[in-house]
Amino acid sequence: MTKPIIRFEHVSMNYNDSKLILDDISFELEEGKFYTLLGPSGCGKTTILRLIAGFMEPTQGDIYFDGELVNNIPANERQVNTVFQDYALFPHLNVFENVAFGLRIKKVNNKEVTERVLEALKFVSLAGFENREITEMSGGQRQRVAIARAIVNDPKVILLDEPLSALDLKLRSEMQYELRELQQRLGKTFVFVTHDQEEALAMSDEIFVMNEGKIQQSGTPLDIYDEPINRFVADFIGESNIVEGRMVRDYLVEFNGKQFECVDGGVKPNEKVDIIIRPEDLVITTQGAGMIDVEVDTQLFRGVHYELSTYDADGNEWLVHSTKKAEVGETIGLHFDPEDVHVMRLNETEEAFDIRMEAYGGAEDE
Ligand SMILES: Nc1ncnc2c1ncn2[C@@H]1O[C@H](COP(=O)(O)OP(=O)(O)OP(=O)(O)O)[C@@H](O)[C@H]1O
């Protein structure tokens, strides 16, 4: 059974009495899971990490750690360690002393320091690197030293603030695997901050999508990708075709002047909605044989698939990902299945969505 480790209850935050940086945030994190805070720059991700770490107190609301209220507990008394974006390693200390730093401050005896540092370095595959200078380590190796320094204290929670952003693309994807694997071996709670949606989808047990100080949606990567609850989430996670439509009745929606079957209900008849169809769910067929006809404007080869930018008669753009090729200037048909038509109420919040689904009687698409 998993156990709650961190709980935010109606937490709000503003730095200098000005704009609210976090706006009434509540969530619970369980032990041993990999969580990602995902959102655009300035949405409040790092502020959440600082509150968990104890670097500051919330303006309003309560924070619980392992069942205990910790609003006033300072950072050094919390069982949390942070891996910073720039790693914050000490350039004048070697690898061993960098990892040992926190233990030395706590006056742990030398024998135990040696044991724990060597074990932490082994854990991140850096055994044998103890005497190297930090300046002699590569970007990926520095990253691992920073992680060793966090795990050597045996914290319950490890916070990672965009730790991969300084690495080049290839190393970054290697480190994604490594971090995920490390988290599973350690069995500790990781809270990872990124504004890269692919990274979040690849690594997390659960993602919190944030915008303007609010959690827009939380859930597994699959939930969030397949069932975004509003236009912001749909737009932020992956590429989407978003058009305005109208709910005719349960399971029937109208857009582009036509009615289409869908699998969504629980929205009032005639209510205006946003419709999302993912580019990979659009299947190319011949003109007149699909649900809509579009003209191909541009076509790019993306390695695994072609990316087509197409326009319907009303001038709406439809992005298509397909292994099939089309010709620029050609009119083609696009087919989609009812389950690929995602219906969202305008400006839906997660809370409103849950209430609506409960009243409607269960999961939206099952
Ligand atoms: N110490 C501070 N004093 C005043 N305002 C701050 C402080 N730290 C952050 N802010 C403001 O709070 C907002 C949220 O910042 P935060 O660092 O939490 O965002 P973020 O989502 O982590 O962004 P990024 O991805 O750019 O790091 C921003 O508008 C920022 O300017």
Image (spheres, rainbow, N blue to C red):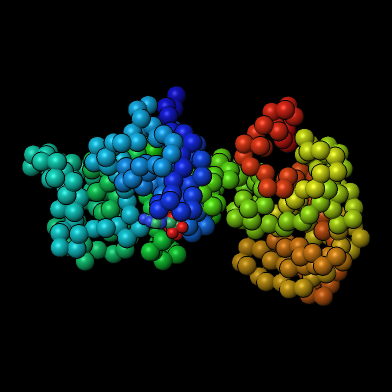
Residue most extreme to the right: 288
| In the foreground, 99 or 53 | 53
Residue most extreme to the front: 17
User: At 61% across and 66% down in the image, what residue appears?
Assistant: 303
Q: Is residue 163 left or right of residue 206?
A: left
The image quarter containing residue 338 is: top right
| In the foreground, 77 or 366 | 77
Residue most extreme to the left: 110
Residue 262 visible in this rendered orientation of the protein: yes
Q: Is residue 336 left or right of residue 258?
A: left
Q: Is residue 170 left or right of residue 77?
A: right
Quadrant where the N terminus is found in the figure = top left
Quadrant where the C terminus is found in the figure = top right
Residue most extreme to the top: 1
Residue 243 in the image: x percent, y percent?
77, 56
User: At 49% across and 53% down in the image, what residue appears?
Assistant: 19
| In the foreground, 52 or 145 | 52
